Amino acid sequence: TVESKKSSNMPNLIRKPAVVALYLLVSASAFSPFRGGRYLPAPTSSLVHRHPQSLISPTRASSPNRALLNVAASEVPTPSNDHSSSRIRQLFSAFTALWKDVARFISQRILWPNSAPDASVSAPLPPSTMGCPLFGHNILAGSKHHGPYVFFANAAKKLGNPKIYRYFAFGFPFVSVSGKDNIKATLKGEFDPDGINTMSVSEGMSLVFGKESIVYQNDKKKHALLRRLAGQAMTPVALRKAVPTIQATAEKLIDKYFLNAGSESSVTMENMMEVYTMDIARKQILGLDIEDDELETFEKNISDWINGIFNPLLMTPGIPKFVARSTKGGRARDYLVSKLEERLEYLATLNESDGSSLGAMFFAVDEDDNKLTKQQLIDNALILILAGTETSSSTLTVASLLLGLHPDIYQRLREEQQALQAQHGDTMTMELLDEECPYLDAVIRETMRLKPIDGMVERKTATTLVVDGKQIPQKYLVYANIRQTHADDPTTFLEDGSHMDVYKGFIPDRWLDDETKPSEWMGFGEGQRRCLGERLAMCEMKIFLASLARKVNGYALANGGNDIIWKPISVMARPSDGVEVVLT
């Protein structure tokens, strides 16, 4: 019989533990949900297979049915080694399916928690690279050949360059989304209860960078109020008044670093750009009048505060408030807040703005007589400092590198400015910079295309989203991948990747023709949280490069521009030598 056949096989089976497990599984399956369920299909004639002769013997059947049963009995296979092997294969398949489910449960709920798919959504999860269990990848790390955030370039390459992919970092599940249409589709539900909202990765990060800033405000009405009031500091009228001060600052620094240093001296462009953007932050954004002996302290605290972005401790979930405040970034914030509080006390004694961005926000009132609170003023002024210093100085530093690598482009920039001076004189205005300097605008946008900020502030999904056929489950963090969006732009894309290369891909002329103009440029972000300081950043970058082109005939890279090495850790890409140049 079949039963005796199984018994005789047991001595051989016990030598193979995996097969024993399968044997036990099938033994239990007759009395468990496994039978006829997910792992073992319900046999259509299991009893017949176990005892075929006894159940359909013609001697036990009534005579009218005897002939039919004789036929049935002749068609039922007798137990054989083939049948046992088939059963073992079936059990092995069931065991494999069970193991996959167990492994999936451990993976998505224990090793990389909260990364499971939404079972109610039929769309599949995007491909993934999850990294170290519980922690994930170190997404802040960079390399000397790529610059900061090399993880994203490596992950995209490893996964076949998908538009959307998953990863795990700092104990959270993330999704990287690239492509302008995909990013827009992801952000269209921003501020909706079932949509997507900005969040700080941790409480510590929001403590250092401000809970009341426009960046982290998730209430739609409050966000609109902040943007309306803080935006009054960024209007064309407000910036038009700032142009003379910014131009004077730029020309003074160029004279100091270039014209007064002599032709044999080298200049580190990064240092000059940092001094320039710090001066604008101090004078134009905050309106501060800091003594020379405290200037170094002020600039160091801004740098320490910005570099708090890279402190893993601040990204740790559940970090106590006092720990966050005791970090270098937290202490730097306390210093900057003290300076802002002093300035706010001074502004309260005035009847109108002092011309600074902080002053414009202080006196800003909407149609309902709403004003910004003290905390809102402080947090949003700090965000403007971040936008006006780190991002602008990085872009200008890279632009100086690119112009050194491509002296013909620098000469075209000079020709445009010389023509402007001949027609309008030396005084710059917003109208001239925006309407009469297309090549200047193209140089800046092309720089930001090649070396953009690597992402936008993370959003958190309130419900499961489906984008480009892939599900982004509830409570995932979404990273808008700007660099990959630029790299995959169909208008500029080249198979060999040279369109993103600083040697071969820097072509400002592409911006001057509608057929070659990039179609997926996102230099200042996208959506309702698009960079509030965009106008100020473009204004200060245009003024500096225009002033440089007017005053400096030409320069060369001190290292010849060969084998550029990038800083591995920075907010945006920066050459490790700071772009050292000499006059030509």
Image (cartoon, helix red, strand yellow):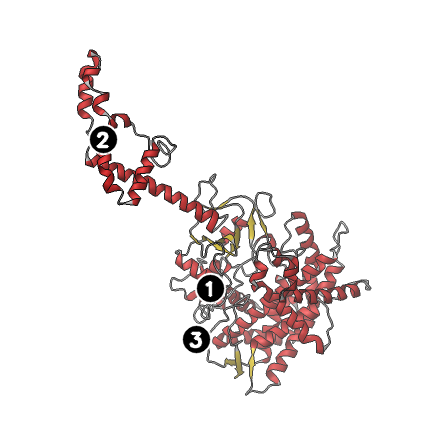
The residue that label 1 is drawn on is: 150
Of mark 2 and mark 1, the one earlier in the sequence is 2
Q: Label 3 neighbourhood size at 10 Å, few (<14), some (14-19), many (20+)? A: few
Residue 344 lies, in percent from the top left, at 76, 63
Question: What residue is drawn where x is 43% and y is 75%?
Answer: 563
Rounded to the nearest angstrom, the CA distance separating label 3 from label 1 is: 17 Å
Q: Nearer the viewer, residue 306 or 112?
A: 112
The residue that label 2 is drawn on is: 2
Rounded to the nearest angstrom, the CA distance separating label 3 from label 2 is: 75 Å
Where disc 1 sits, the SS reads helix
Name the amino acid type tagged 2: Val
- Report the mark closest to the observer, 3 or 1: 1
Cβ atoms at labels 2 and 1 below 8 Å apart: no
The answer to whether residue 327 shows anywhere in this view is: yes
Quarter of the image that includes the N terminus: top left
The residue that label 3 is drawn on is: 563
